[in-house]
Image (cartoon, grey):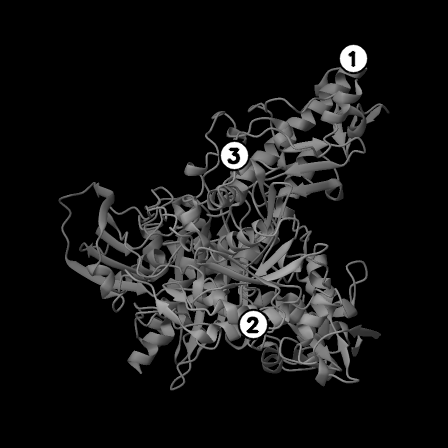
Amino acid sequence: MIELNVNGSVARADVDPATPLLYVLRGDLGLHAAKFGCGLGQCGSCTVLLDDRPVFSCLLPVGAIGDHAVTTVEGLGTAKAPGGVQRAFLHEQAGQCGYCIPGMIARAEALLRRTTTPTEEEMRTAMAPSLCRCGTHMRILRAVRRAAVARGGGIVDPAEPVT
Amino acid sequence: MTPSRREMLGGLLVAFALTPGVYAQTGGGEGSGGPPTTAPDLPGTLAKFPDLDAWIRIAPDGRVTVFTGKAELGTGIKTAIAQLAADELDVALERIDLITADTELTPNEGVTAGSQTLEQSGTAVANAAANVRLLLAEAAAARWGVAATDLFTRDGAVLDGRGRSASYADLAGMTSLAVRARGDVPRKRHEARRLIGRPIPRVDLPAKLTGLPAYVQDMRLPGMLHARVLRGPSAGTRGLFDLSAVARLPGVDRIVRRGGFAAIVGPREWPLERALHMAARSGWQAEDGRNEPGALPDSLLRMRRESQTIEDRRDEPDARSVRRLSARYDRPYLMHGAIGPSCAVALFEDGRLTVWTHSQGVEPLRGSIAGLLAMPAERIRCVHREGAGCYGHNGADDVAGDAALVAFAMPGVPVRLQWSREQEHGWEPLGPAMLAQLDAALDASGRIIDWRHQVWSNTHSTRPTAAGDLLAGREMVPPFPATPPKPIPQPNGGGDRNAIPLYAFPNSHVVSHFLPDMPIRVSALRGLGAHLNIFALESFMDELAAAAGRDPVAFRLGHLQDPRAAAVIRRAVRRFGWEGYKALPNRGRGFAFARYKNHGAYLAVALDVERVPDEGRLIVHRAVAAVDSGEAVNPDGIRNQVEGGIVQSLSWTAYEAAGYDGARRTDYDWSTYPILRFGDAPRSVIVDVMDRPGTPFLGTGECAQGPTAAALANALAAANGIRIRALPVARSSARVV
């Protein structure tokens, strides 16, 4: 039995400790925000927060997590009460098919926990591990800039203004 | 009012009679399909399903259910269709329940493709809603003994303006919607609209952004088992599996076999995926009888072809040319590259099969699965559930066939079958490689007097219309025959989409060379041939403008007669600042324009691009576009589509090429098939929507693919004088450095 701290609660799953976190989140805990995209750590659809850092949950064995806190997009807010980054994504309508977006939100959240005043380049570098096929990149970047402002910071040299 | 009548009119979600699909004729094409037209006087898909209750039902509690045969592919059509229905009916958006593509519930609108959802389904829903609103007003008029023309509607009620009101819920019971739509019911004046034309937030995003189950990949049914299909590494191969060894792998409860098809089934995904990787170690062999593709692009010229002249205009046969130019343009095979691998859920129970699928065409899929299982189509229901953005025919239909086969072998057990990343990359049908040869002549005044365009391409649709079009169908013994590929005729076109110029050239000759033999599995990719044809046409326009010594924008305007085309061009270049542009070293501006399919949306785009010396890296500083989609139902939805189209086309055009080594494909994940990441996304993208209230909707979803490709090449030519004619740019740059 593996015990995990997920979104502030203790979660238990009877799985092989080698099982990647993504499969436990989706298959055992009913948390569907993190998505399967490649299973190779190449696309970022499965991104969640481990403490305050973004991780590819498709690669992280649950047995290696220990006491570290796992936060998924479900832990950042709900459809009725969205969190700050989610509000920014909604404001910018940053989604087409939306499949990559939970990973994007998790990655943006990690960036903004580290700094609310990154440069444009730092923001893009932080987001780069996550792929989007719909080409929603511009809106996702706008949403991250907006979320940074909402946290009292802002992108130092934004390529597009926050309106 | 009798109870039975109320029940019927109240719109409870009972199945209603639909004309059975004519499967042999559906699909295959691109977004057409569905049953024959029976009411040619009615607009959009009302012409095929003229009865109002096929589209709209009102429940006793006043909730409105709207039906569309089109599917949400991530383009925002759920929101746009709900806006149309709510506005034309005069109810709050929140009162609309929208049912999308479901063979049991919705009109058969064929395939959701070709940027035709609003043109076909949106037009039908809007006009059906206007009809229903009139019928409700007439019901109130009859009740009150007044003229319907003296009444008005507001927020789900009919009012007489003197204090009397009747809710739709109340009136629905005395109003039959099982009546044929009238073609002469006016839609609301645009001044009176509350939702159409407004940037209403997407109805689906809150769930998607907070992790609520939203995709077929998220479905979890009680007692559901997982499955993985065993195949060779890519299309053109067969896997060699030791099934008795696979059956002993941990987590594999059983193997479902049928002919050459095999899938492993178990309760948990991770052990199955490990088993899948273990199983693949026993190797594969190349399929017999495959065609060697040879080296692109010249191999396309050597293939068997069926040539058709699709334009032959000779208005000024005696015009004197002073200069002739020729150029060849080509693109490689491109991948759809959905971020989520294809997935389907299926349940075979009590002799009936239900398949939840992200296919773009639930109706033709149903017919194909019926053939695969030798089951009557009437006992199969295909229900659309969203997947990751597909951008054409990817693995969605194939995986639905796979899941159907497994579920069919396990009655009563819901089965969720998902492809691996490697399977999606290896098996999805690619967008075809293409080649275009352009020739043109200028007269002494710098006017184009002769235009010739030839294009060589495989088919742009192998969407399933029969069992043999599904991968599983080819694995049966004996295999089902694949439907022979055929060209998609003009005016939409397939490989020749947008090959006919919109410009007013006095002499013009366009030939489409259809290549029926497919060395590599191909099918529809966003925009079909429009990507390469517009890349070629709009690159060549710049080359001709340079030869004529003219500004490329002014040169285009001089050859255009369509005022809406001129308007989007002027809007885009004004917003871009084309006139005052100051070129910096290694940096240039590029422009391109097209009207998608020559009858869809107008799109003009200007780019400001830098090529970093030595590195070859591209920086798109600015992209500025103007789009005329006719009446804009949701301007932010249009902006979202065009922004995304620009970025996606930059990715295709600059970086992408799918490889094949003669026996199998060479790209199995993102490491060898890189797509654009945030570091290479434009610094800024601006899209101006030019709303044309009262005019028909013009398909928008694919309109940016071609113009963006040409604008990039034109900007690079301006930046450093190197004209890119072979895509992708990154490969060309490797050659020139």
Residue lying at the far top of the rendered structure:
B145
Q: Position of residue B479 (x, y in %)?
A: 38, 51
Residue for point 65% across, 33% down: B15
Up-down: is B137 above or below B334?
A: above
Residue for point 64% across, 57% down: B215
| Dot 1: chain letter | B
Instruction: Find disc 1 in the rendering and name its residue.
Output: B145
Does residue B360 appear anywhere in the picture?
yes
| Dot 3: chain letter | B
Classify the position of the C terminus of chain B by image quarter: bottom left
Residue B275, label in figure = 2
- Disc 2 marks a residue whose amino acid type is Ala
Q: Nearer the viewer, mark 3 or mark 1?
A: 3
Q: Nearer the viewer, mark 1 or mark 2?
A: 2
Bin the neighbour count of mark 1 within 10 Å (Cα to Cα): few under 14, some 14-19, many 20 and up.
Answer: few
Q: Is residue B595 left or right of residue A21?
A: left
Q: CA distance from mark 3 to mark 1?
A: 34 Å
Q: Is residue A126 left or right of residue B520?
A: right
For this rendering, which residue is in front, A112 or B391? B391
Q: CA distance from mark 2 to mark 3?
A: 49 Å
For this rendering, which residue is in front, A73 or B216? B216
Instruction: Find disc 3 in the rendering and name its residue.
Output: B44
